Image: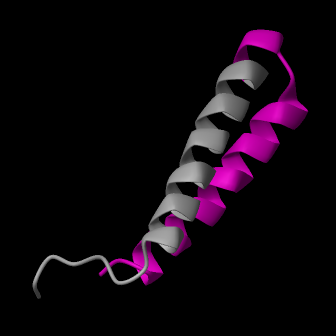
């Protein structure tokens, strides 16, 4: 491997999902909203496979 990322758009998408999950979990925890916590957790669950499958 030459260290070249074959698809930076997928890397950005995974990072975006991770940041969105962190924001949703933080806001949900501060607001005491289980809905936001749940959505944040499922967003994190979705970000995991994207990162694992598209890792160069």
Across and down, in percent, residue 28 comes to: 77, 24
Q: Quadrant of residue 46?
A: bottom right
Across and down, in percent, residue 49 comes to: 53, 73
- Give the left or right position of residue 3, taking residue 37 as reference: left
Quadrant position of the C terminus in the picture: bottom left
Across and down, in percent, residue 23 comes to: 65, 30
What range is drawn magenta here? 29-56
Colour pattern? one colour
- Give the left or right position of residue 10, taking residue 52 as reference: right
Q: 53 or 4: which is nearer to us?
A: 4
Across and down, in percent, residue 31 comes to: 82, 12
- Give the left or right position of residue 8, taking residue 49 as reference: left
Q: Measuring 59% from the left and 35% from the top, which residue is drawn there?
A: 22
Outermost residue to the top: 30
Q: Measuring 57% from the left and 41% from the top, which residue is drawn there?
A: 19
Q: Is residue 40 above or below residue 5?
A: above
Q: How many marks do you count on the picture?
A: 0
Q: Is residue 1 above or below residue 41?
A: below
Q: Is residue 16 above or below residue 47?
A: above
Task: Based on the picture, tell me whether residue 32 belongs to the magenta stretch.
Answer: yes
Quadrant position of the N terminus in the picture: bottom left
Outermost residue to the left: 2
Q: Measuring 30% from the left and 76% from the top, which residue is drawn there?
A: 5
Task: Based on the picture, tell me whether residue 5 belongs to the magenta stretch.
Answer: no
Q: Quadrant of residue 32?
A: top right
Q: Measuring 35% from the left and 84% from the top, which residue is drawn there?
A: 6
- Principal secondary structure, stretch drawn in magenta: helix
Q: Quadrant of residue 4?
A: bottom left
- Give the left or right position of residue 15, taking residue 39 as reference: left
């Amino acid at each position: 491997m030459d260290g070249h990322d074959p698809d930076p758009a997928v890397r950005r998408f995974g990072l975006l999902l991770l940041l969105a999950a962190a924001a949703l979990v933080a806001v949900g925890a501060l607001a005491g909203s289980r809905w936001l916590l749940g959505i944040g957790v499922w967003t994190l669950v979705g970000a995991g496979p994207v990162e694992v499958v598209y890792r160069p």
